[in-house]
Amino acid sequence: MSIKKLSKDVFKSFVDALIASDQQVIGVKEKVQAKGNRFAFDNLQSADQLRLDYDITLLPPKKYMLPQDETLLTFKVAGESKSKIDNSKLILIGVHPYDMIAINQMDELFSQDQQDNHYMTRRKNITIIACDVATPSKNVFASSMGTATVESGFDILLTDIGDAYVAQAGTDKGEKLLAKASGAVNASDDDLAKRKAIQDKNKDALNKHKLNCKPSDLPGLLEKAYDHPVWEEKAKTCYSCGSCNTTCPTCYCFDVQDQVNWDLKTGQRERSWDGCLLENFANVAGDHNFRKPREARFRHRLYRKGKYVPTKIGGQIACVGCGRCINGCIPDIANPVAVYNRILEDIKPD
Amino acid sequence: MSKPRVAIFDFACCEGCQLQIVNLEEEILDLISVVDVVEWREAMSEQSEEYDIAIIEGSITRPEDEERIKDIRSKAKVLIAIGACATMGGLNKLKNNFQDLEEVKKCVYKDSASMPHLETSMTKAVDEVVPVDFKVHGCPIEKEDFARIIRSLLLGKTPEVPNYPVCVECKKKENVCRWEYGEICLGPIIRAGCGAKCPSASYRCFGCRGYVDNPNVDAAVDVMDKYGLTVDQLKSKMVLFGSKQGPTL
Amino acid sequence: MCDCCSSEKDIYLPELATITKAEMMNQTEMFMHLEFDSGKELGHQAGQFVEVSIAGIGEAPISVSSSPQQKGFEMVIRNVGRLTNAIHGLKAGDKLGIRGPYGSGYPVDELKGKDLVFICGGIGLVPQRSLINYVVSNKDEYGKIVILQGTKEYEQRIYTEDLKKWDDIDGVTVLETIDVAHDSWKGNVGVVTTLIPKIEVDLTAAMNLVCGPPIMYKFVLMALQEKKVSHDNIFVNLERRMKCGVGKCGHCQMNDQYVCQTGPVYRYSELASVPEAI
Ligand SMILES: Cc1cc2nc3c(=O)[nH]c(=O)nc-3n(C[C@H](O)[C@H](O)[C@H](O)COP(=O)(O)OP(=O)(O)OC[C@H]3O[C@@H](n4cnc5c(N)ncnc54)[C@H](O)[C@@H]3O)c2cc1C
Ligand code: SF4
Ligand code: SF4
Ligand code: SF4
Ligand code: SF4
Ligand code: SF4
Ligand code: FES
């Protein structure tokens, strides 16, 4: 597949042309509400709004495949239900490598065993233009997790080499799209060398927290850490606010509830984000809570990331080192690296 | 099946919650297509002695209010408390922080303080006087939340009331956290359901929906240190809606 | 990805089934028999469950209580919340949404040739009943069958006719107990573990199948431990919160196990590395 070079002007007209087409185009924009530079994926009205130099978005792009709230079914009360599948097409510009890897993991999780068509239909209708990180965020640790760069999943991967972008097609869909960029030229060896330098640098530089073991050591480490004091040490100031779940690109737990319309005859079955840190996540009738202590819920998340979910996705660690849980945790206890390193003080991995 | 008869009553409050019901606008028509509103001082002149559902706004602040609410309870099959005043005493509970209520009266009403209609006692939430079946939280209530709860009840289903904090809805809306601006946002210990209304408007949550069932108040104290704030600063934020409800610091 | 999974089937879409029979078994438990409107059979294995829903109210996991070999399927529903309360208002002719069957069920073949001891608490009998019915109707293939049923209060007893019917079968023994003494009750009083010493079969050689409320497991497992029963010979049937039933929503998870997929039936020895299980 081809690797091209798009000067900044060529890239801008390329994006503006996409916006002018009938497809919905989403890109990383500065968050209006924020005083400082904070970013979010949002509808693009013009290429000028696109900020590929962003550090991190407040929420990961999962909100486009698995929206915060979505209708799964519409129904007649006490009667028949119909699937509601969202078929809208969109182009997502600016997905960072760690977020791309998280999407790849979610694709696997939602398609394995019994496929979730609500997720998968959205996913298939999304064209992803990923981009290498230009500005490391304050808590990113993707280098520690091996997720600072990405090999697959994207349709196009962009790298900012200064005066231009190198654009690599990753799929046929990406190849066709890239062909529409008029003024793009084939990338030269020199361009590719520049790109490699940036990617090599990111492999070390996206590391504001350094994990003191290989990611692949985590399942074995956690095997021996179930009763480690770290869970209580950290969780005693946990609010059970779930921010470490809601902002995480690899959290995908959900709740389902029925809502009825005013006619009391029709309604919708709705799915919305849930989180294992929330107090009632494992409640059943009789007010029995299978994960009642805060530390048990706190531990569950870090086991999900480091040990449980990996068994479902071929051993990949389900934390991609984006650092959002660290950014969002008011008492500052959610940092996976801090937790895993604390365990490493006492326990050696196999 | 005949439509359930609904009566709306107000006690000590600002009537802002009833205004939220009025604000339902077109949905008001939907509402009255499924219920008969038989008494509602804010919107109609009729009064009724017969109703299935009593909706109560406001807190109980005078001895005669206690008699009135007991009477309403005895007639209603279902009693719903709406708004912070009714569900937890609300702002009216601020006065409970003072030892001497006569002093409060003098401070508020000056020379008129001894007039009989200003007789006052400790503020009570409705459920401190009579059993409450359902609560619609908030100051004021959220109209969508109210509408959802009413529809659920009309369907015979216990409404879902979140027991997770405002942060969940706030993060889902992709707001920038107020703590990053050095503000004391009570979101992590306050019950969600408002859609994180205040942080979404760049304002901290001041706790109008009351605590979640099991707020980690100790964590709140620890966190003060981290942000270079004092526990007194936290307390001053919590007193607005937190007076003598649940765990007070 | 094979064709069958890329088809447009929506895993969250329930299929309507009609209640053909519904009756109260006591004050809190309702028995019902259902048939799919499409005429298809559920095709479940003993121990599996379905996701049951009323559109507008909600959805919940409910065990299938009937043997896989009969027409239609049966459930017993305890009134504890939104959906179950609404179901209690239904009658024959009304409809429910059904997804499934889900979960792993009992390893019926592995149980062949063995003595079987069912230890049930309250409505723990419900999911076990599907297996009991299956094994009593294929009695030749199994050894002795013992059914222990413990109920909190006299009024809460369920499947009393079934218990009597099973007890009359040659090679099947039913022992019943209630926690709280009652004037009309002449039998054993005490928790279900008080029945264990009364069993005549060799527990260590038998397959012991346990199902009941969360609190019951600890005590029953302790009692079996005392009798030196190997953990390989114990099966437990666990309850968890479930939303999807298909391994996605995360609610049913205990450590690395998704109860909706690998459970609700587990061999106890498999749970050694699952501290959240019991
Ligand atoms: C595999 C399996 C098999 C089962 N088989 C049967 C069976 O055969 N028969 C049977 O009667 N039951 C069975 N159950 C249990 C049944 O699924 C539950 O009782 C059912 O989910 C209750 O649903 P509901 O809508 O009526 O209750 P809900 O209204 O959902 O609530 C019931 C209780 O659940 C808790 N709860 C629910 N949602 C929340 C929340 N958001 N926050 C806090 N707490 C909450 C509360 O404690 C509440 O009192 C089974 C469960 C499993 C997992
Ligand atoms: S656990 Fe934290 S750092 Fe890891 S992927 Fe999730 S939000 Fe990012
Ligand atoms: S179990 Fe917890 S950590 Fe895992 S996906 Fe669900 S919410 Fe996230
Ligand atoms: S973000 Fe922090 S405080 Fe909130 S649930 Fe997660 S660990 Fe606990
Ligand atoms: S602004 Fe308030 S509600 Fe929102 S995440 Fe921060 S603390 Fe929570
Ligand atoms: S954000 Fe807080 S104060 Fe504002 S409406 Fe919600 S609960 Fe009330
Ligand atoms: S019930 Fe959803 S994962 Fe098991």
Image (spheres, helix red, strand yellow):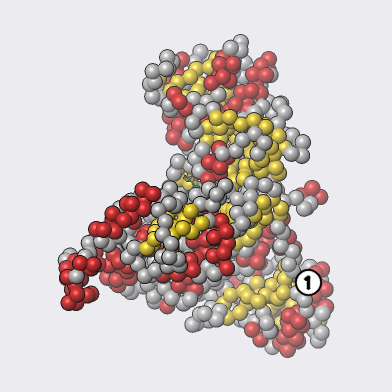
A212 displayed left or right of A258: left
Q: How many labels does the image show?
A: 1
**Looking at the image, residue B113 lies above or below residue B245:** below
Looking at this view, is A305 or A78 the one in front? Answer: A78
Q: Where is residue A49 in the image (x, y as percent from the top left)?
A: 64, 84
**Looking at the image, residue B26 lies above or below residue C67:** below
Please give the name of the residue rendered at 60% of the width and 62% of the height, measured from the top-left corner.
Answer: A69
Q: Where is residue C4 in the image (x, y as percent from the top left)?
A: 79, 47
Q: Is residue B232 visible?
A: yes
Q: Is mark 1 on a helix, strand or loop?
A: helix
Quarter of the figure with residue B41: bottom left
Quarter of the figure with residue C153: top left
Q: Pointer 1: what residue?
A: A174
Look at label 1 and name its amino acid. Gly
A8 displayed left or right of C63: right
Q: Is residue B18 visible?
A: no
Q: Quadrant of the N terminus of chain A?
A: bottom right
Please give the name of the residue rendered at 75% of the width and 79% of the height, measured from the top-left corner.
Answer: A18
